Image (cartoon, grey):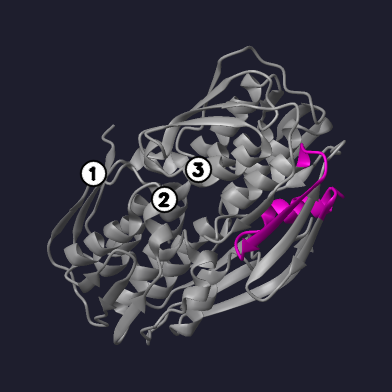
Amino acid sequence: MTNSIKIKRKINKFNKKIKVSGDKSLSIRWVLFSSIASGISKAKNLLLSDDVLAALNVIRKLGIKSKINKKECVIYGKGIDGYKYNNKLTLDAKNSGTLGRLILGLLINTPKLIKLIGDKSLSKRDFKRIAKPLSKFGAKIKLSNRNNLPLTILGSKNLKPIKYIENIGSAQCKSSVIFAGMRTNGKTIIKAKKSRNHTELLSKHLSLPIKIKSKKNYDLIEVKKVKKIDKLNYDIPSDISSAAFFIVLTALSKNSKLTITNVNINPTRIGIITILKKMGVKINIKNKRKYKGEKIANIQVISSNNIRAINCPPSLNSGAIDEFLIIFLVAAKAKGISYFKNLNELNQKESPRLVWGAKILSKMGIKVIAKKNSIKIYGNPNIKINKNIIIKDFLKDHRVFMTSVIAALTFGGSWTIHDRDSIKTSFPKFLNIINKIKKN
């Protein structure tokens, strides 16, 4: 079977209800929390992507047993200090920045040298940003080429709590320091720019010694040493980052309607909904409810005929950082010039996504002006594509692949999109759901 996909025609109108896969951020965090919990934790709707499977493999190498069956995943936790492993162990985070950075916080007190590696894409990403604060606790971390994987970590028996300012908006760095603080005597204090707060919500749900004071532009987080974590049984809500592709598919298709059920609408994750509503996309949030600290709901989307350009406020960036590629497609169909700025973090992902966003739009015939951390998109509400477009060599970035599929189905043209296996990283069922929507 070829590892590329060909799309030669637009999708027909549809009216469907779907459920997307479990939230990747929550799935990985469930694996890590359960690995240091006391007792047996069970999860339903766990995302069985490469990133989550890598997390399960990492805890297995740390001596924690798990098993997966059709209904659920089970992890047999051995307690807060339950990791058992040999010296000079190598852990592979594969493509997952979340796993790579968060696991380091849990290894802050490792008495044995551990090597952390990743795939080609992850090995290009910045790990100095987390090695620096973790080193202040007392761990010894040695990086390759000053910033990147592979790295080695050797913990300390005499960890010291730290004061840490996280001013990038990285939930991964913040969460890693929270995990490290849970292993340290004393009080670790974090002043963090607003970002995803899944780790904090799960910590509060588990009644861990963590206090959060929410200010206008930042959170003040206090973490004390954790003695015990109770087992965590979890029916994982669906991932809004995965739902985003179908929100945009519907918005850009003619005479279509879609309901996506049981989606995590955590306020730190719904930047895409805020942005798209400002652009005139018809989105309704229904059946709101709360589950283990997270807000979940059904999302209804209706085709949008009059899409407006946007000068996107940078304050919305962190809540939509994984969705900007797909947002750019909406801007391509908007009336007017859309402007997105302060997007440095977009190029710190699996591929330089700001670069790839500009490439995809340029291939479609949309005028763009892309700079190091910003992009202007000159929308064309009447765009029609009648040419061949090839998407390849994008570092196997799953979001580049999926964005290209949505572009092909909504804008037309004849597309050849390579590296379909990239979706195994975050959303293996993506093409299956596409095919369900396409069926009348």
Residue 252: image x %, image y %?
A: 37, 73
Callout 2 amino acid: Lys
Q: Which span of residues is magenta-colored?
A: 182-210
Work out how far the residue at label 2 is from the one at label 3, CA to CA, in angstroms.
8 Å
SS under mark 2: loop
Q: Who comes first in sequence, dot 3 or dot 1?
A: 3
Residue at the disc numbered 1: 393
Callout 1 amino acid: Asp
Task: Please tell me how crowded label 1 is: few (under 14), some (14-19), or many (20+) other residues with Cα within 10 Å.
Answer: few
The residue under the point 42% across, 37% down is 148
Q: Who comes first in sequence, dot 2 or dot 1?
A: 2
Callout 3 amino acid: Gly
Between label 2 and label 1, give the one nearer the viewer.
Answer: 2
Residue 268: image x %, image y %?
A: 62, 65
Q: Are marks 2 and 3 in contact (CB under 8 Å)?
A: yes
Q: Are marks 2 and 1 in contact (CB under 8 Å)?
A: no
